[in-house]
Image (cartoon, helix red, strand yellow):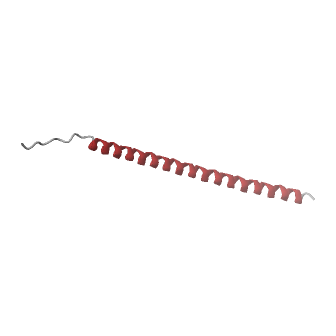
Amino acid sequence: MLIIPCQGVIYQGKLSAISYQLSAISYQLSAISYQLSAISYQLSVYELGHSVEASQRRSITASKPVPLTTDG
């Protein structure tokens, strides 16, 4: 009579340990996805900075005064 409840408690303990491990794994996965989203955010900011820099360069070269040459 006492063996069955004890086994049931051990079984429940194993299940709770498994569910704890699964929640830890899902937490690690969410942390990894958070890191990946942070990396992609940094990359998008980096690309945005480059595109802004390139457009500024283009506007600077476009706004340079063209010297007028008057050949007499």
Please give left or right for residue 65 compared with residue 48 in the image: left
From the top left corner, tell me how far across and down residue 9 is, in percent: 83, 55
What's the residue at 80%, 58% (across, down)? 11
Q: Choose top left, top right, bottom left or bottom right for residue 4.
A: bottom right
What's the residue at 31%, 45% (across, down)? 58
Quadrant in the picture for the N terminus = bottom right
From the top left corner, tell me how far across and down residue 35 is, in percent: 53, 49
Farthest residue, direction front:
72
The number of callouts visible is: 0
25 or 37: nearer the viewer: 37
27 or 39: nearer the viewer: 39
72 or 24: nearer the viewer: 72
What's the residue at 56%, 48% (across, down)? 34
What's the residue at 27%, 44% (across, down)? 61
From the top left corner, tell me how far across and down residue 40 is, in percent: 49, 50
Please give left or right for residue 35 compared with residue 54 in the image: right
Q: Choose top left, top right, bottom left or bottom right for residue 14.
A: bottom right
42 or 29: nearer the viewer: 42
Quadrant in the picture for the C terminus = top left
Farthest residue, direction left:
72
From the top left corner, tell me how far across and down residue 57 is, in percent: 31, 44
